Image (spheres, rainbow, N blue to C red):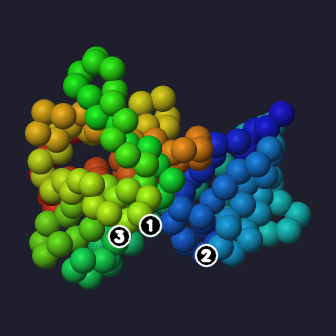
Amino acid sequence: KKSAEYLEQVLYVCPSCKTIGTMFSKGNAFSCRKCGYELEYNSLRKFISTKNDVVYNNIRDWNKWQQTYLSEYMENSKDDGKEILHDKNLNFYTGYKSKRLKYLTGGSLSLILNGTEYYLQIKDTKDNEIKSFNIINISGLNIQNKERLEFYHDGVLYTMKGKLKKFSAYKWLNALEYLVKDKKAKFQL
């Protein structure tokens, strides 16, 4: 059984090197691309390892820690114009309510601080900006099917999902909820 498959949709920070977005799964293995931290996720739903110290042996504790870490990371990421979060290899779609989605572009999503305002930025595969959203104008932020991030902006539904099922929409939800909770941005969830 492939018990670790798609864990990176939920667990997006390496507890060893504290890098965001470098965890990946294959079969029962769950590893960090940056530092090589490697675990096995067993049938008892516990992390075990013969190679590394197990920092968190279950998803709940790891997730609780990473949410705190993400908050601290974002609090310390205040350089104007700097990408705070970034994901590539995404597909973007637009729509309205239950109408069929229309393909917008393939490319990347970034969270950027511009002065005192936070923006989500969609770029195509050639790094051309397609759309930029001040996050205070976003509403209806949610995750669909554990793999798609959705929100409304100016009455248009925007949906993004990874070209592979390894995209962590949950990471983006946590980051944007942090900005709301900390009153850095105000929008309707």
Residue neighbourhood size for the residue with mark 2, other residues' Cα within 10 Å, grouped as few (<14), some (14–19), many (≥20):
few
**Residue farthest toward the top in the current orientation of the protein:** 98
Q: What element carries label 3?
A: strand
**Residue farthest toward the right in the current orientation of the protein:** 50
Could you say where residue 13 lies in the image, as x and y percent from the top left?
54, 62
Of 170 and 167, which appears nearest the observer?
167
Amino acid residing under circle 1: Tyr
- On the image, numbered disc 1 is attached to which residue? 69
- On the image, numbered disc 2 is attached to which residue? 17
Discs 3/1, front: 3
Amino acid residing under circle 3: Ile
The image quarter containing residue 4 is top right
> How far separated are the C-alphas under marks 2 and 3?
17 Å
- Marked residue nearer the N-terminal end (2 or 3): 2
Q: What element carries label 2?
A: loop
The structure residue drawn at horizontal position 33% and vertical position 41%, both measured from the top left corner, is: 104
Of 162 and 7, which appears nearest the observer?
162
